[in-house]
Image (cartoon, helix red, strand yellow):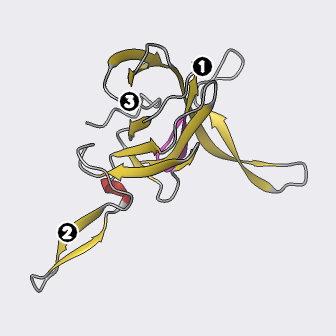
Amino acid sequence: MKKPLFFLLASISLSFGVVSPHVGQVGSQPVFAQTQQQQALNLELIGHLRTTERNWRGEERVAWRSLEGGFMRPAPRVRPGDIVRYTVNGNNRTDQPLSGLVLTDDLPENTVYVMGSAAAVGGATVTFSIDGGQTYSANPTIQVTLPNGRVETRPAPAERYTHVRWTFRNAVPARAAVSGQYQVRVR
């Protein structure tokens, strides 16, 4: 189930192999982690709103403004059509490599995935779900029935994407960090 847009910090689940579950918090959203030892991975979820700014020459450039806000700077207001970028940072806090890391995030309600925006730092394969997180594929497809009755396979439209997943091929080295990132457009 998609989370409401007002929970702009997305919920993340991660796993390394089912040994001992750990539930923590990232902002106001719960984070579910399955690790081989408690507190092995420190997670940070950051949301940024895409804005445009003008430099001293009057040239426009893209800037990313934190959704969190602060004491002197309130959180920005998110409106339909805005682009939000989510970044998941995972820091291995142990002296041992962590293998089999999988990060999964569900897209917020009232948003649409921006095609081609998912990326990873740390050697991950990015896959997507269009069925609520039941199955994942690098290039999800749907079956479309044409007017002549023939069924054709086509790429799934961005509106159908429900989850993004990063599967890290290599172990996360001791005291190292990995990250995943994607963007959504607010409906």
Mark 1 neighbour class, 10 Å CA radius: few under 14, some 14 to 19, many 20 or more: few
Quarter of the image where one finds residue 163: top left
Name the mark on residue 143: 2
Q: Find numbered disc 2 in the image and state the secondary structure of the residue it sits on.
A: strand
User: Front-most of 90 and 83?
Assistant: 90
Counting residues from the N terminus, which is met first, the one under dot 1 or under dot 2?
1
Residue for point 42% across, 29% down: 6
Mark 3 neighbour class, 10 Å CA radius: few under 14, some 14 to 19, many 20 or more: many
Counting residues from the N terminus, which is met first, the one under dot 2 or under dot 3?
3
Q: Residue furthest front?
A: 96
Residue for point 40% across, 34% down: 5
- Identify the residue under disc 1: 95
Name the mark on residue 20: none
Query: Looking at the image, is 91 positioned above or below residue 110?
Result: above
Magenta region: which residues?
Answer: 77-88
- Identify the residue under disc 3: 15
User: Front-most of 109 and 16?
Assistant: 16
Mark 1 and mark 3: span between their CA atoms? Answer: 18 Å
Residue for point 41% across, 37% down: 102
Residue 84 is situated, as x and y percent measured from the top left of the image, at 53, 43
Q: Is residue 184 magenta?
A: no
Q: Find numbered disc 1 in the image and state the secondary structure of the residue it sits on.
A: loop
